[in-house]
Image: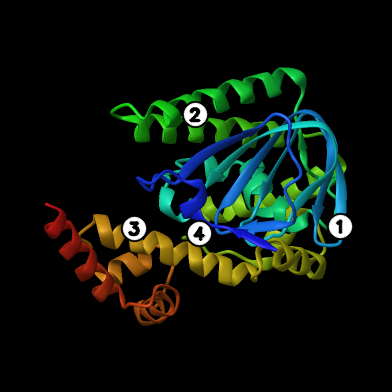
Amino acid sequence: MRVLSIHEWFHADGFPIAVERRDPQAPFGLHSHDFAELVIITGGRGMHVTGQDSWELTTGDVFVIAGDRPHDYLNLDQLSLINILFVAEKLNLNLFDLSSLAGYHALFTLEPAYRRQHQFKSRLHLTARDLAAVVSLAEQLEGELRRREPGFGFMATATFMQLTGFLARCYHRSSHPDGHSLLRLGAVLSHLERSYAEPLYLEDLAAKAKMPLRSFLRAFHRATGCSPLAYLIQLRVNRGAELLRNGRDSVTDIAFQVGFSDSNYFARQFRKILGLSPREYRHQNQARLIGDG
């Protein structure tokens, strides 16, 4: 199986977004990659294959493929698509309030993990009007990346964010029942993003997902790869890291601000997740800022 690398498919300047248009898609073979893909089906039909599973694709389908997920396209009947390749960890996007939208989590976090369980029925399917809007944004993004005029990085990132937000809203309006189950879990993730510093209880999260507790815990782990507590600790540590980079408050004050009642526990979790103590992390990032200046 071929593994596609960042160096093959992204510009030599290292910018972490690229656009590949396939009109039509040619046979390619089973492959994976060390980046993610946002796939927009713009015409024709075909089968999407991931390992032993396959699902029919039609015009208007939109889905995200995680980098380590092998996939291919078969039974091609003038299948046309736009692939938006991205390296999320290099984008460092400020999502502002987008993470409070259940549709964002459904499309970019939950739906890839649930694809097999729902036999791909939970995928986003755009109306003709929404597809035209999405294609227009993709063409704007493609133009910025092709011309690479001064400021292209800002403009391309802004367009990618606009596209992401639009698709999240489209998913939020989804009428498919399998999509609704993802939106309920997405609503839990949105709640965690908004309320990470507050005391949170599993029973309340399960109620928000409209699931029995045991079913909720299984579904959450299946979708995110971790428990709700581990997900919450990751959120708190990430927010703490942001405050350490950008603020002057003490480690103890930051621990309390992000929801930890014990600064020593915060420090242990911080080191476990990021590999440094909070003080080491702050010192390293302050030194980097001085060096950049």
Q: Please give the residue where the numbered disc 4 appears in the rendered image.
A: 196
Mark drawn on residue 105: none
Q: Please give the residue where the numbered disc 1 appears in the rendered image.
A: 53
The answer to whether residue 240 is left or right of residue 211 is: left
Amino acid at dot 1: Asp
The answer to whether residue 5 is left or right of residue 23 is: left
**Which residue does the image show at 34% across and 58% down from the upper left?**
242
Q: Nearer the viewer, mark 3 or mark 4?
A: 3
Which circle's residue, 3 or 4, is located before the other in the chain? 4
Q: Please give the residue where the numbered disc 3 appears in the rendered image.
A: 242
Amino acid at dot 2: Leu
| Mark 1 crowd level (few <14, some 14–19, many ≥20, 10 Å Cα) | few
The answer for how far apart the CA atoms under marks 2 and 4 are is: 33 Å
Q: Nearer the viewer, mark 1 or mark 3?
A: 1
| Mark 4 crowd level (few <14, some 14–19, many ≥20, 10 Å Cα) | many
On the rendered image, what quadrant is the N terminus found in? bottom right
